[in-house]
C-alpha cells in the first residue's frame, strides 16, 4: 500500500469511527440558558472522543494494513475483483 493510499484509508476509517464515537456518553443540559438548544450536550468531551477515535482507528488500520501486506493484495486488486 503506497503512502497516499494509506493516508486516505486512515482518514476514511478515522471519520467513520468519529461518527460512531460522538454519541458516547452524551447527556443533555438540564436547564439550558436562553438561546441555547435543549438537546445540546452538557459536556461534549471532544478531546477525549478524538483521542478514543484515533486509538480505535490505529488498531483497525494496522489490522487492515497487515492483512493487505501479507496477502499481497492491493486495494486495486480488490476493487477489480468486485467491479460490476
Image (tube, rainbow, N blue to C red):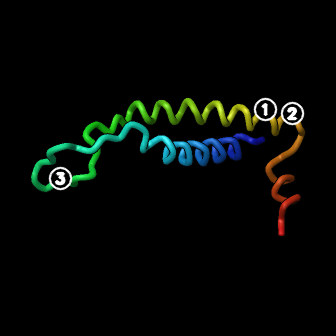
Given the current orientation, which residue lies at the most extreme left position?
Answer: 34
**Which quadrant does the N terminus fall into?**
top right
Label 1 – label 3 distance at C-alpha = 47 Å
Asked whether disc 2 touches disc 1, contact meaning CB atoms under 8 Å apart, the reply is yes
* Quadrant that contains the C terminus: bottom right
- Decide if residue 6 is on the left or right side of residue 15: right
Q: Viewer-proximal residue, 43 or 68?
A: 43
Q: Which residue in the protein does label 2 denote?
A: 70
Pinpoint residue 38: horizontal percent, then vertical percent.
22, 53
User: Where is residue 66 drawn, in percent x and y?
Assistant: 78, 32
Q: Position of residue 67 (x, y in %)?
A: 81, 36
Percent of width and height locating residue 56: 58, 33
Q: Earlier in the sequence, mark 1 or mark 3?
A: 3
Return the residue nearer the eye: 9 or 53: 53
Q: Secondary structure at mark 2?
A: helix
**Total number of numbered discs in the rendering:** 3
Q: Residues within 10 Å of mark 3 (few under 14, many from 20)?
A: few
Residue at label 1?
66
Q: Residue furthest bottom?
A: 84
Residue at 79 percent of width and 50 percent of height: 75
> The residue tagged with tag 3: helix, strand or loop?
loop
Image depth: mark 1 or mark 3 in front? 3
* Mark 2 or mark 3: whose residue is earlier in sequence: 3
Task: Tell me which residue sits at (41%, 30%) in the image.
Answer: 48
Q: Which residue is mark 3?
A: 36
Asked whether, in this view, residue 70 is left or right of residue 59, the answer is right
Q: Residue at x 75, y 42 (%)?
A: 2
The kind of secondary structure element at disc 1 is helix
Amino acid at each position: 500500500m503506497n503512502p497516499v493510499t494509506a493516508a486516505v484509508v486512515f482518514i476514511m476509517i478515522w471519520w467513520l469511527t468519529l461518527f460512531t464515537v460522538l454519541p458516547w456518553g452524551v447527556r443533555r443540559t438540564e436547564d439550558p440558558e436562553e438561546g441555547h438548544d435543549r438537546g445540546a450536550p452538557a459536556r461534549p468531551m471532544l478531546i477525549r472522543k478524538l483521542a478514543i477515535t484515533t486509538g480505535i482507528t490505529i488498531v483497525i488500520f494496522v489490522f487492515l494494513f497487515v492483512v493487505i501486506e501479507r496477502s499481497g493484495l492491493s486495494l486495486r486488486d480488490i476493487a477489480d475483483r468486485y467491479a460490476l
